[in-house]
Image: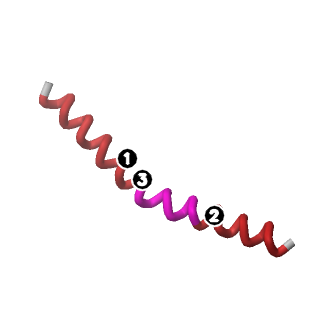
Amino acid sequence: MLILLLIIAISMIVVGITNTIIAPILTGIGFIIIVLILKK
């Protein structure tokens, strides 16, 4: 049971870290795409 809770905690931390890394990248890509569309 304790091991299961540990696995859940680790997976939640990993998801949190990936979200903080991926979210700004996706925002940046979206912004670049919008700029390219507006420039055409």
Is 26 positioned to the left or the right of 38 in the image? left
Q: Residue at x 64, y 67 (%)?
A: 31
Q: Is residue 36 left or right of residue 22?
A: right
Q: Earlier in the sequence, mark 2 or mark 3?
A: 3
> Bounds of the magenta span?
19-27
- The residue tagged 1 is 15
Q: Position of residue 6 (x, y in %)?
A: 19, 37
At which x and y percent is residue 15?
A: 37, 46
Name the amino acid, label 1: Val
- On the image, numbered disc 2 is attached to which residue? 29
Report the amino acid beneath label 3. Answer: Thr
Asked if the stretch drawn in magenta spans residue 24, the answer is yes
The colour scheme applied to this rendered structure is secondary structure
Taking the spot 21% from the left edge, 29% from the top edge, the residue there is 4
The foreground one among 31 and 12 is 31
Residue type of the residue flagged with mark 2: Ile
Mark 1 or mark 2: whose residue is earlier in sequence: 1
Give the CA separation, mark 2 to mark 3.
Answer: 16 Å
**Residue that appears at 12% across and 30% down:** 2
Could you say which disc has been placed on residue 18 in the image?
3
